Amino acid sequence: MKGKDHYPKIITDETLRETAQHGSEEYPFRYYVEDIWSFDFHCIDWHWHSEVEFVFVEKGTAVFLVGSGRYVLSAGMGIFINTQVIHRFEAAESTVIPNIVFSASLLSPEGSLIHRKYIQPVLNSSADCLVFSPSVPWQNEALNTLLSIFAIQEAENPSEIKTAELLFKLWNTIYENAGLTENIPVSQAAARAQVQIMMQYIHQNYCRHISLDDIAGTVKLSKSSVLNLFRRYLHTSPISYLVNHRLKCAAMLLVTTENSVSSVAQETGFENTGYFCRKFKELFRQTPGEYRKGSLCLYAQRGQKGIT
């Protein structure tokens, strides 16, 4: 089989920055309606972008890993994700999340009074994200505004000026009520960068032997410091992250090639096929053979229905 993903996935560059353009240069705004469960491995994997993002949980329950935080949101709740903050969304079942991603420049150009006085304090705040609950009055107001923005996008001819008007309203609700403290601590920004460097190293070298010393060496930190950073920002250990990344790469090879299971194991950095099979079943709840068979059947069904 030739390489074609059977689920949607986030595409990033080597720094984990999302490569997709959200909107256009003249109108940097994009509306999406997505089901986390339909994405590759049932998650919207680690990525970041310069745009800000607002997400609403319409159906189901989602786990949002944002910066160093972990947030579980049920239907009716929402979340704001600040610029350049690494994040990942997970779900255990179908979870629909309409969302908007846009550049703050849509509200005002950098250097303007409005940008300096109202936009920049939010962008430069120490908050990686804000969670909105309908039980908190000002947050409920933000959620209702967000739903109004979605409704405009669902119209046959979405109005850009009405969208911008509501985006200003949404932004002002945050500015006036969230009590944000401006300026991201230098240590926090440095820690984020170090985590991204280590993740990038793992993504580029997962197929060969990698030790904790190797990972720590990329950022010149002690092993204990690296362990703490991974637990804080990714909620796992460096080696567990490495193993899971290898397994996900192996899963793609099982679907996109006819290579044997032992060959796939070796290609993705596993020296022992038995260990690979055990870890694969732990993550996917299927043996590699079962996963390959089920995925190929799903791919065939999607092809018959004309789904690309």
Image: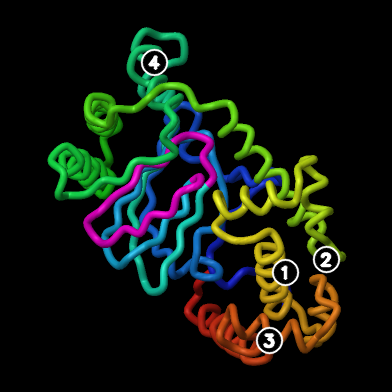
Secondary structure at badge 1 equals helix
Q: Earlier in the sequence, mark 1 or mark 2?
A: 2
Secondary structure at badge 2 equals loop
Name the residue tied to disc 2: 207
Question: Looking at the picture, which amino acid does disc 2 mark?
Answer: Cys
Mark 2 vs 3: CB contact within 8 A: no
Q: Disc 2 to disc 3, how far (Cα)?
A: 18 Å
Q: Position of residue 282 (x, y in %)?
A: 60, 82
Name the residue tied to disc 4: 115
Instruction: Point out which mark residue 246 bears.
Output: 1
- Which of the two marks, 3 or 4, is nearer to us in this view? 3
Instruction: Point out which mark residue 278 bears.
Output: 3
Q: Earlier in the sequence, mark 2 or mark 4?
A: 4
Q: Disc 1 to disc 2, how far (Cα)?
A: 7 Å
* Range of magenta residues: 67-86
- Which of the two marks, 4 or 1, is nearer to us in this view? 1
Q: Earlier in the sequence, mark 2 or mark 3?
A: 2
Question: Looking at the picture, which amino acid does disc 3 mark?
Answer: Arg
- Which of the two marks, 2 or 3, is nearer to us in this view? 3
Total labels: the figure holds 4
Q: Disc 3 to disc 4, how far (Cα)?
A: 53 Å
- Judged left or right of residue 161, residue 277 is right
